[in-house]
Image: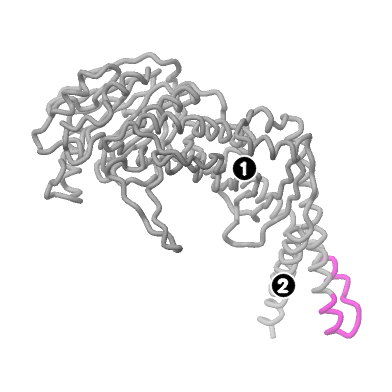
Amino acid sequence: MRWTSRLRPAAMTLLVVMASLTGGMITASLWPVTVETDYYAAEVHLSPGWGELSSIGTDTVVGSVSAEFAGLAPGVRIEPRVKPEITQLVQSGNLDPSTLDVSAAERSRVIREAATGVGLRFGGGALAGLGVVLLGIGLRRRGAPGRRSVVGGVLVTAVTCAGVGLAAQRTYAPDRLESLRSTGLLELAASKRGLLASVEERADEATPYLRNLLALSSALQQEYAPHRIPTETAVKALLVSDIHSTNEYALMRTIIEEQDIDVVIDSGDLLTFGNVEVGVSDLHRSISSLGVPYVFVRGNHDASSRTDTRLLEQMANTEGVVLLEPTPDEYQEVTVGGVRIAGFNDPRYFDDPLRGDEDNQHEARDQWLEAWGERPAPDLTVSHEPAAVDDVPGQLRINGHMHRAELDGNRIQVGTFTGAGTLRHFIGRTDGELVGQPHTFDVLAFGENCRAQALTRYQFRSVLSGSPTYDSVSMVNAERIAKDVDEGRTCGGDDLEVESVPGE
């Protein structure tokens, strides 16, 4: 009996907590709060799904946006309504990002109104849940529940609501943002039926669509990203990989111009099958035309044997190119605007029998580490294959090779900029249609303290077929994935320094 008497209050408390949570979630999910700005109206409500915990998601006229946060709180869904004239503007493809701007005052007011409204609905639902519990107690007792039960239930409900509110406040703090993703964005491109004769001309044709994508994604980030993530950056790097002999540098020039890129970092496989003689569309001339430093490490497709250095020699003589490992006995550290970049070549070559041999990659890594010695860690450490950057120092580790964009801790795997170019392969959809690999690239921004700020990832398709289609754009809070940097450093500008690091 003593155990029963002790367990009964705990069981009752748990019952009230569950009833309050259930009632609050149901009410705040089914009864949305309506908020408005000059350009938008939106309904805000909680999401009951476990898969949407600690996230804020919305489906907009320009795609689906989801922000994921570190913490544990109910998910939030936003259902916006956009004025018809703005919808027409987006559909026209002549998008001015300022059209989508929401002032800081409007944003603060809307957030405050939405939080208050959702909180009141959750509290009302929680009290309704408590009422159901008290009603059950009354029916069981065949009379009104006792005062102690009512007061205790109200206190437990109040504490439950306060706990949920505090968890939401802490979880949805701007500095706890982990990633911001937009999918289905936007298919702005109208169908292009005429195929152009030249690969380079087709890439030129695609630049207006890419320019619209960049403008639209910038507007989305300004709209949905927390303001503690700085919009002013000191240095911007464009990360590309696996170009595979295809000249789409007109697209790359567009990105450099539209995004104010300070340096391009290419993590290898500029060629295909180790064939240096096939200079498709004059890659070297196009690289020289970019107007910013082009930092390069060799990939496994960039040589035909372990001793084949022909591409490295050609790249060394290409204006604007800086090699991180120009020869097997020498490495280089490249500093752009104070951001330090280092790395090493893929030890493999095309048709190397040691395919997938991690020991081979680790051996190349260890040789670089030995040469690097006690030097300060780079901000970016670059190589071609994933295993090569295992346990290397640096704020962020960069690799390509896999033809798909991924994140693993502080390792950034860059997808293929050209959809694998002449090495393109296709995947089958459920309807039987073959779909080519997407084109992907990343824009990495650094702050004045030399710390990585934001990683913006783009994915699109069908550039060379003449009908580019944009799959997605996502923004990751790079501060949450990057390793710490030394205090007291200052970055900014586009000054270029190259320092030799002799091998052992």
Q: Position of residue 327 (x, y in %)?
A: 14, 26
Q: Nearer the viewer, residue 56 or 138?
A: 56
User: Which residue does the numbered mark 2 point to in the structure image?
Assistant: 15
**Which image quadrant: the N terminus?**
bottom right
The residue under label 2 is which amino acid type? Leu
Q: Which mark is residue 62?
A: 1
- Which residue is the extreme one toward the right? 143
Could you tell me which residue is drawn at 45 percent across and 42 percent down?
460
Q: Is residue 252 above or below residue 357?
A: above
Sequence-wise first label, 1 or 2: 2
Which region of the structure is painted magenta?
Answer: 135-152
Q: Is residue 337 magenta?
A: no
Q: Quick one: SS at disc 1?
A: loop
Q: Position of residue 373 (x, y in %)?
A: 21, 28
Q: Is residue 450 above or below residue 346?
A: above
Task: Answer left or right for 86 relative to 194.
Answer: right
Please tell me how crowded label 2 is: few (under 14), some (14-19), or many (20+) other residues with Cα within 10 Å.
Answer: some
Q: Quick one: SS at disc 2?
A: helix
Could you tell me which residue is drawn at 45 percent across and 17 percent down?
492
Between marks 1 and 2 in the image, the one whose residue lies nearer the viewer: 1
Could you tell me which residue is drawn at 40 percent across and 45 percent down?
438
Q: Nearer the viewer, residue 306 or 394?
A: 306
Q: Is residue 293 above or below residue 466?
A: above
The residue under label 1 is which amino acid type? Val
Q: Give the prevailing secondary structure in the magenta stretch.
A: helix
Q: CA distance from mark 1 to mark 2?
A: 43 Å
Q: Is residue 145 magenta?
A: yes
**Circle 1/circle 2 CB separation < 8 Å:** no
Could you tell me which residue is drawn at 31 percent across and 29 percent down?
377
